[in-house]
């Protein structure tokens, strides 16, 4: 069993900052990637940022230059620093972790329950 818990969401004014955290625990041999996704009501879930085990990152065009994803490998934790927030960033943010439970084993992905980010204008 693997648990993924997000924290750090909340209400912030436009132009402000928030830092989201994602902690993974349980039967984890290795983490191949950790990513942040977001979903607005009535819309599909979309990738915000992702970091793989080697440290490479990818970002959605809409957040490049404003958001930064990082990872503490030893703590199985990922962070999303969000600066210069805009009202259109208002969404539920979800963390996804891609893990293996044994060396060369299959890849599994697990999702957290989500954390609400609301940006007021």
Image (cartoon, rainbow, N blue to C red):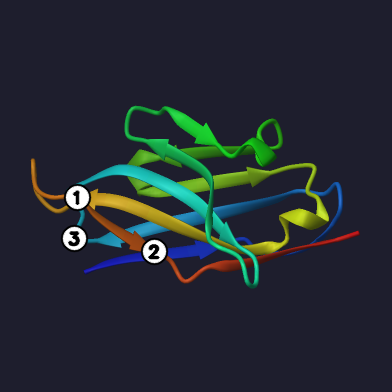
Q: Give the image location of residue 101, x and y in percent.
A: 14, 53
Q: Quadrant of the C terminus?
A: bottom right
Q: How many marks?
A: 3
Which residue does the numbered mark 1 point to in the structure image?
Answer: 107
Image position of 55 (left or right of 85)? left
Residue 21's place in the image compared with 52, above or below, is below
- Residue drawn at the location 59% of the way across and 54% of the way down: 20
Between marks 2 and 3 in the image, the one whose residue lies nearer the viewer: 2
Q: Give the image location of residue 24, x and y in percent.
A: 35, 58
Residue in front for this viewpoint, 13 or 62: 62
Say which element carries label 1: loop
Q: Give the image location of residue 85, x and y in percent.
A: 78, 48
Which residue does the numbered mark 3 point to in the structure image?
Answer: 27
Say which element carries label 2: strand
Image position of 3 (left or right of 28)? right
Looking at marks 2 and 3 on the same chain, the residue that comes earlier in the sequence is marked by: 3
Disc 1/disc 3 C-alpha distance (Å): 13 Å
Q: Quadrant of the N terminus?
A: bottom left
Mark 1 and mark 3 residues within 8 Å of each other at the beta carbon: no
Q: Residues within 10 Å of mark 2 (few under 14, many from 20)?
A: many
Which residue does the numbered mark 2 point to in the structure image?
Answer: 111
Residue in front for this viewpoint, 24 or 43: 43
Q: Give the image location of residue 9, x and y in percent.
A: 65, 63
- The image quadrant of residue 25 is bottom left
- The image quadrant of residue 5 is bottom left
């Amino acid at each position: 069993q693997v648990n993924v818990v997000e924290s750090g969401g909340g209400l912030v004014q436009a132009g402000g900052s928030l830092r989201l955290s994602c902690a993974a625990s349980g039967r984890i041999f290795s983490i191949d990637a950790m990513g942040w996704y977001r979903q607005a009501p009535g819309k599909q879930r979309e990738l915000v940022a992702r970091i793989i085990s080697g440290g490479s990152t990818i970002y959605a065009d809409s957040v490049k230059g404003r958001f930064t994803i990082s990872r503490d490998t030893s703590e199985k934790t990922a962070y999303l620093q969000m600066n210069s927030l805009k009202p259109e960033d208002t969404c539920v943010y979800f963390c996804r972790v891609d893990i293996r439970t044994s060396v060369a084993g299959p890849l599994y992905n697990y999702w957290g329950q989500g954390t609400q980010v609301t940006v007021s204008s």
